[in-house]
Every structure is written in structure tokens, then in C-alpha cells.
Image (tube, rainbow, N blue to C red):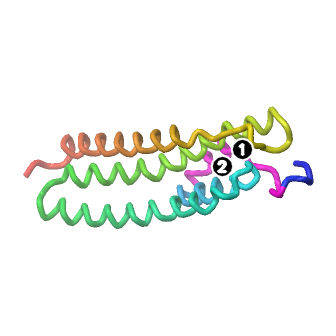
Amino acid sequence: MSTDTPNTGSPSNPEKIMARISLISTIGVGYMLAQNWKPLGKPEWVRPTLLLVFGIPVGGFALLIGALEVAVSLRAYWLFGMVALSFFAMNWGLAWVLMRLQKKGYQWLLSSEPKLDSTYTYDVRTAVLTWLGLVRLGGVVGVVLAILFFPKP
């Protein structure tokens, strides 16, 4: 990168970061992807990404524990299946969507000038809708699996 850019260092390939997910968890990958915003020209997106990366697992885990208690007391095992797979989809989906969002900027950076400028825009709307779709799909799959595999009351 040129010295006239305010961001130091070169960006990492988001696909290589995502490949580490099985080794360092979704939180670790999310942290690495958050730090990757700086060299990709969006340093203001680091903090919101970090809040999502740490907030979603903590909030999702609390929701998962609450759903387990409710599911056991009501014998509504489908509820636990829905929340469990939604939680899984939230974490992995967030990391995947961040990777996809950064991938296009990374490819643009490699094929263009040595720095990102105002001509490149990130498609945040599609990324958010994709992530929400993954969470909903996880919930539906969780309900189906819970109905099929949990014992009926």
C-alpha cells in the first residue's frame, strides 16, 4: 500500500481468515475480520463488527439457556431445536457474511489501485438480509430436526 493512505498494513484474504474458523471459533474469526476493515478502507466498521462478533454469541447463549429451560418445562423440544440451530446459524452466518462482504472489496483492491477509494461501495443491505435469512433457515431446520428426533411427550 502507498504511504499516503491512513491505514497501515495490507488486508488479509477474507477467505483465508474464514478457513481458520474450525481452529479458533467464530469469535476469533470475527475479530480477525473486524480488524481487516482497516486496510480495506472502512476503519469505522471495526467497532460495530466487534460488537456484533462478541454480542451475538453472548446474547445467543443466554437465549439458548433460557430456551432450554422453557423447552424442558413445557416439553416443547422443538423450541430448543429452533433456538439451538438459530444460534449456530447466527454465529457461522455472521462470519460467513463478513467474509463475503470483505471478499469483493479485497478482490477490488487486488485488481485496482493500491488503496480503496470512494468509488468502491460495500453491499451491506444484501449482507444483512443474507445473514437474517441464514438465521431463519437455521431456526426452521432446528424445528424440523427437533420434531423428527426428540421424543414426543
Residue at the limit of the structure toward the front, as seen here = 118
Q: Which disc number belongs to residue 13?
A: 1
Under tag 1, what secondary structure?
loop
User: Residue 67: which quarter of the image?
Assistant: bottom left
Under tag 2, what secondary structure?
helix
Q: Is residue 61 left or right of residue 112?
A: left
Please check the rendered image and state whether residue 108 is part of the magenta-colored stretch, yes or no.
no
In this view, the residue in front, 99 or 123, is 123
Residue at the limit of the structure toward the right, as seen here = 3
Magenta stretch: give its range: 6-23
Residues at circles 1 and 2 in contact by the CB criterion of under 8 Å: yes
Residue 51 position (above or below residue 18):
below
Badge 1 crowding class, 10 Å Cα cut-off, few under 14, some 14 to 19, many 20 or more, is some
- Tell me which amino acid carries mark 1: Asn
Badge 2 crowding class, 10 Å Cα cut-off, few under 14, some 14 to 19, many 20 or more, is some
Instruction: Point out residue 37 in the picture as x, y percentages from the top left corner.
Output: 69, 53
Instruction: Point out residue 122 in the picture as x, y percentages from the top left corner.
Output: 63, 41
At 46% from the left and 44% from the top, the residue drawn is: 131
Where is mark 2, residue-wise? 17
At 66% from the left and 58% from the top, the residue drawn is: 44
